[in-house]
């Protein structure tokens, strides 16, 4: 069963308050999981108030409405606002604490060669098994008529998503040698949500993200299908001093795992040297999907992503050293502005 919730209030503060009140137990669980994770990576002297204050300041500067929503979630869940700001900045805090980088998430966009057929966009979401039931599909309806669906963790404002304007976003984590060096910048999860709230084309989303001053790296893989620009895709590779950019290959295929593709940024990426599996996963997906790129179908992409060789669909038995597993498989239905989420990997397995 997929956990889903639709907000009934369009005011950011009230929407957050409602969400926090309804999901107080789940939000508190998210805070507890990340507080423990921060302590594991940074020792016992983690000041969540200071970290959350830094994060909230960065959010207020770039996305004030989402800062209000975060304040509302905190009030509704009866938790300090710095706790909620901190879990929204969990990627940034882990980067600052020099947490162990992990290989996670594979994203695929296939534009196809038929101008009238919609793109295919899917990804796996790999993360700690402690969050196996800590996520939902959240639907937000805005006063201007735009609807946003985002798969996210309880208390975090956004992640993977799609909106009714025909814009979708797939999300993978990246690593840059400058990550976490200068405190906490704009959280990448907040950047993803603002894109879904405000943009309906790859072009407008790319221009918005060009001004995102982040302190930790991620790829925001943007794909749109609509009257404004037809079919289009680009990856914003967010990093301190960035972003970098990556466009689809000539056959309209865009595949992103956990390393930088922009050649200007790749020399500053330590991840492939430490975790070459990210290179293998991307290569396996590209070769597996090359023949399907012209006339893509979601079921074919799902079948290729189900192959366990290389770790695209990733499972380990409980107690294994590698705690990162495929928690969800997500497909974006761009023509209908819908998000299809399944628990576990694309193979159908749910091993927590």
Image (cartoon, rainbow, N blue to C red):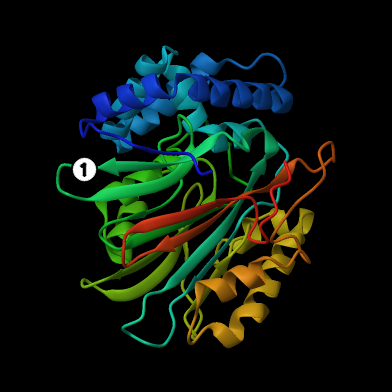
Q: Quadrant of the N terminus?
A: top right
Please indicate whether residue 164 sits to the left or right of residue 100 in the image.
Answer: left
Note whether residue 127 is visible: yes
| 156 or 313, nearer to the observer | 313
The part of the image, by quadrant, that contains residue 303 is bottom right
Q: Please, is residue 197 above or below residue 297 in the view? A: above
Note whether residue 52 is visible: no
Q: Residue 41: image x %, image y %?
A: 71, 28
State the residue at coordinates (78%, 53%).
Answer: 274
Please indicate whether residue 114 sits to the left or right of residue 87 in the image.
Answer: left
Q: Quadrant of the C terminus?
A: top right
Give SS at disc 1.
loop
For label 1, the crowd category at 10 Å Cα-Cα, with few meaning under 14, some 14 to 19 and many 20 or more, is some
Please indicate whether residue 162 sits to the left or right of residue 322 in the image.
Answer: left
| 306 or 1, nearer to the observer | 1
Q: Which residue is mark 1?
A: 142
Q: Residue 283: image x %, image y %?
A: 69, 73
Q: Please, is residue 281 above or below residue 3 in the view? A: below
The part of the image, by quadrant, that contains residue 4 is top left
Please indicate whether residue 183 sits to the left or right of residue 318 in the image.
Answer: left
């Amino acid at each position: 069963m997929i956990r889903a919730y639709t907000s009934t209030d369009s005011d950011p503060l009230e929407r957050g308050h409602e969400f926090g009140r309804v999901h107080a137990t789940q939000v508190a669980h998210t805070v507890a999981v990340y507080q423990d994770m921060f302590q594991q990576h940074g020792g016992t002297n983690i000041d969540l108030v200071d970290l959350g204050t830094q994060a909230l300041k960065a959010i207020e500067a770039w996305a004030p409405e989402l800062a209000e929503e975060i304040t509302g979630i905190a009030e509704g869940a009866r938790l300090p606002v710095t706790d909620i700001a901190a879990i929204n900045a969990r990627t940034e805090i882990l980067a600052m604490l020099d947490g162990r980088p992990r290989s996670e998430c594979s994203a695929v966009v296939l534009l196809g060669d038929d101008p009238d057929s919609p793109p295919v966009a899917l990804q796996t979401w790999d993360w700690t098994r402690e969050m196996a039931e800590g996520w939902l599909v959240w639907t937000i309806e805005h006063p201007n008529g735009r609807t946003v669906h985002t798969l996210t963790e309880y208390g975090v404002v956004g992640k993977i998503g799609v909106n009714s304007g025909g814009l979708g976003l797939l999300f993978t984590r990246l690593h840059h040698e400058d990550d976490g060096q200068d405190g906490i910048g704009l959280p990448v999860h907040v950047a993803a949500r603002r894109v879904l709230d405000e943009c309906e084309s790859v072009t407008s989303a790319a221009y918005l993200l060009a001004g995102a001053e982040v302190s930790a790296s991620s790829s925001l893989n943007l794909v749109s299908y609509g009257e404004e620009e037809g079919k289009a895709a680009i990856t914003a590779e967010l990093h301190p001093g960035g972003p970098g950019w990556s466009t689809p290959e000539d056959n309209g295929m865009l595949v992103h795992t956990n390393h930088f593709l922009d050649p200007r940024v790749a020399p500053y990426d330590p991840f492939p040297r430490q975790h070459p599996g990210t290179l293998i996963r991307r290569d396996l997906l590209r070769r597996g999907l090359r023949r399907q790129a012209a006339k893509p179908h979601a079921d074919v992409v799902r079948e290729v992503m189900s192959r366990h060789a290389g770790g695209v669909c990733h499972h380990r038995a409980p107690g294994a050293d590698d705690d990162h597993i495929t928690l969800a498989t997500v497909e974006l239905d761009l023509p209908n502005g819908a998000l299809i989420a399944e628990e576990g990997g694309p193979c159908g397995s749910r091993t927590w």
